[in-house]
Image: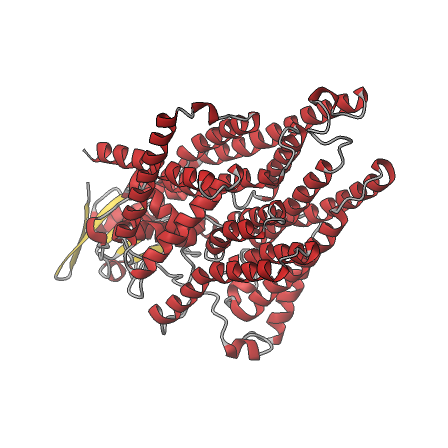
Amino acid sequence: MNSIYQLITGVLLFCSLSGYMLFARTKLKLQTEFVPVFVFSAIGCAVYFFGLAGYLFPGSVILLVIGAILSGVFIYGIIDKKQYQQIRLSLFGVAFAIGSVYFFHGLFISRLIHYDNFSHWALVIKQMLSTNAFPDASSALIDFKNYPLGTSSFIYFFCRFTGNSQPVMLMAQGILIFSCFYAMFGIIEETKRFLLYAFLAAGCSLLSLFNVTIRITNLLVDFLLPVYALVLLAIAYRYQRNIKKACILMAPIAGLLMIVKNTGIIYGGVGFLFLLYLWIKNREKSLWKSGLMIIFSIGTAMIPYILWSWHVKVAFQGIKNKFDISAGNIQNVNGGKTPEEVRQIISLFLKSVFDITSRPTMGVIVFNIVAIISSIFAVTVLKKRWNLWKAVIALDLILMVYYLGILALYIFSMPTDEAMRLAGFERYASSIVVLFVGGLLLCATVDMEHSFYYKIGDMPAYRSYKSVESKIRYQEGIILCLVLAVTLLMSEYNGMMSIQGSYRNTLPYKVYTVTGDRWYLDGRTDENRYLFYASDTDSQVTDYYLQYIGKYMLYAPNVDGICAFYEENMMNLLSSYDYLVIVESDAPEKHLMKKYFHIPGQAGIYKIITAGDTLTLEPVS
């Protein structure tokens, strides 16, 4: 019965999303490439507003029903007016769909592994799906309550009607990511120049090289931040002569981006800065009118961020949150750290930034060089003035400001133990480098588009080349770019499959085989006290990885971990818990279990029974 219900609601969800996209395409007259990301972002923001108001589930149902009704209306209109001929498929659209299905299949068979999925991103979605509400001050499961719930809101909406498994969560976030990639191709005006699509496809595939630590097989948002910002850049450029439409499109997209993560406001700011630059550069007749539109769009996009800041201040008053920046820390030059600690942080930071063996640094150096050489080639050989050199300067400035911001984060906000080892630096750096490289690729695509000898339409299609040699080079360029794109995409896909192929050797799988993935009705948590036992391989116990996985799988806030028993204190320790969960058994543990409890001590769950001075362990089937 449950599977039939999910099938029905899943079909309704598909119809609902289709209805909103048809509405955006036909009534708002939005460009096809920008429609999916616009619709998904608007839905994410709407669900987020309902969640803040305390109507997460009813609001989601309302959104589902409205979209389904829109879908029915548009389908009826198409059938009634016999407008089947208006449905057209492009070569690029078909190719993108095939590639996306390939990756979604990979996501469908994937499971969560990364540490941060269990410490926050997947855990908060599980709580939202279990309680149909945002976490509040009493949510003992959620440690980092000040993390915004932008993507979580959209994933909740998707999972609420299709299922709450880990693959469904990954597919929901994958929809956001791939809608961003699709939108980036909207920057192309000459849609019949397939070389432009092939070049940009190769460039987008190249971004996966800087996404190794934040692959799409997890719910981390570090890759979503830059690709969303790239969408804003594409929209701003494409609609620079239609500021009104640019503002309509950018408001919900930037609005969701700013509540994806606390640093989302930086990436959203990059998109609006570019729009302001184009507005000043073009100086249209209605300069002030379009300027007011931009201000209104920025203000609208800021509403979700402002509401979240207010929500954190009111709902979590008195709760110490991670990465909180207090006035005292800012006034204190050392951010609460000793001068020696600050010097060590700065030294390690500079060493990491300028480490030419690291992937982010190599990407910055290589693409700076390639962009400069390409600009010189354009001037000397093609006799064209490309804007690529301007993009290099602007993006380098953004890069420097961003790195200074990260350094300030480590000094003033991050806990000392994490700051001393630059926790998360590779992910932070990879995010901004994706924006840097992606921005250059978008600019290069536009420069290439303006470098063709003829524009499509000025001449018949078969004569739209300067010479036969030009046409041959054009065709060779398409083949080269397609080969590069397919090779890189296959490499990324194989990397995903390799990670999932080793899933049975991971700690999440070992915990899952013992505990299962538990979901409870009415959002009630398991209040029993659990003690998990496993080896401390790769510090999986001391860095709390085991405990977070246990919290997620059991949906229980009272989870501790241990990697060795001390015989003198073992009985006293166990008496403080309701259950012992052995994830990885070893010889010393088996010896003690056999000696004191007469059990083999294999992996499993054991109920701790205390009767007076006697303590026994009973296996739980």
User: How many numbered discs?
Assistant: 0
* Residue 318 drawn at (x, y percent): 36, 74
Q: Nearer the viewer, residue 67 or 199?
A: 67
Q: In which quarter of the image is the C terminus?
A: top left
Query: Which residue of the protein is positioned furthest toward the right in this rendering?
Result: 380
Q: Nearer the viewer, residue 421 or 588?
A: 421
* Residue 548, visible in the rendered structure: no
Judging from the image, the colouring scheme is secondary structure
Residue at position x 42%, y 49% from top?
42
**Residue 530 location (% of width, % of height):** 27, 54
Q: Where is residue 12 in the image (x, y as percent from the top left)?
A: 30, 36
**Can you see residue 508?**
yes
When asked about the image quadrant of residue 74, the answer is top left
Would residue 36 be found to the left or right of residue 164 on screen? Answer: right
- Residue 580 appears left or right of 485: left
What is the x, y in percent for residue 384?
Answer: 81, 40
Q: In this view, does 350 lie above or below 100?
A: below
Comparing 260 with 360, the one in front is: 260
